[in-house]
Amino acid sequence: MDERNVAVVAGGSGGIGEGVVHALIKAGYRVYVPTRPGDHSERLKAYVGHAADLVTIPADLCDEQAVVAMRDAVVAAEGHVDAVVVSVGADYYGYRLHRMPRTDLDRSIHDNLITHFNIQRSFIDQLRKQDHGTYVTLIGPEAESILVDAGMMSIMAAAQKMMSRVMASEASDSPIRVHALTAHTTVKTRSRGSSSNDDWITAEELGEYVTRLIEGQISGSQEALHELRGLAQVRKALGR
């Protein structure tokens, strides 16, 4: 086993996640990305272009035992995990809360909270055993805004943020760092293409911010909450 830095990026094949994966690989990390049938893992591989530094590993994040098996596979291959980044969630549109079907509520909780719980439960335990590592959850602006006809997205994002805050508080007795990073603007991704605005934070810039946060190179890197309010703030933090 070599001693290079190792990261796991849940949601790494998504539009935002691929920017994080790309930035971590540029910084010298070997990055493991859990995948499932029908995702964009092939697009991610083509975009990153560093076959030896990107490892895709099948895992259903909704299945706790599958997440444990994924973690164990990474640790068996590498001996350690230095960073975990989570960019996972499912959109929900179409109903106001008082008309929302119970089945949709259950699915939203399953896709947005159970997945996060499974990853946290498995990897925070690993980081604690190592006495080393950083855990970052990426959260959208809906955590602090109300979306009419999509209120469940606001509720789930706010819950993800509170989960991160609780984890950060509980990790205060250890050397590990836990962060909730909220982008308060839409993130410009490759998939959005020409529909993007020039003042949006790009997925690549967000990925670089995450990488520098993991490495303690961002001001306030010991703080649990990181609020990215706009492109100028991010570029200033990156020294641009």
Image: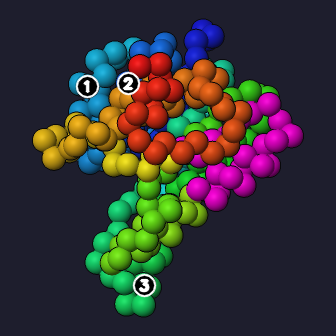
Query: Dot 1 corresponds to which residue?
Result: 47
Give coordinates of residue 22: x percent, y percent: 37, 24
Residue 168 magenta = yes
Is 78 displayed left or right of 132 in the figure? left
Which numbered disc flags the more N-terminal residue, 2 or 3?
2
- Residues at marks 2 and 3 touching, judged by CB atoms closer than 8 Å: no
- Residues at marks 1 and 2 touching, judged by CB atoms closer than 8 Å: yes
Does residue 149 show up? yes
**Label 1 amino acid?**
Tyr
**Label 2 amino acid?**
His
Up-down relation of residue 50 to residue 214 (above or below):
above
Give the residues in magenta. 161-181
Most common SS among magenta residues: helix
Give coordinates of residue 118: x percent, y percent: 60, 53
Which numbered disc flags the more N-terminal residue, 1 or 3?
1
Residue 97: mark in rendering: 3
Name the quadrant of the N terminus.
top right
Quadrant of the rendered image containing residue 153: bottom left
What's the distance in space between the residues labelled 1 and 3, CA to CA? 39 Å
Does residue 127 show up? no
Q: Nearer the viewer, mark 2 or mark 3?
A: 3
Residue 22: mark in rendering: 2
**Label 3 amino acid?**
Leu
Colouring = rainbow
Give coordinates of residue 155: x percent, y percent: 50, 70
Name the quadrant of the C terminus.
top left
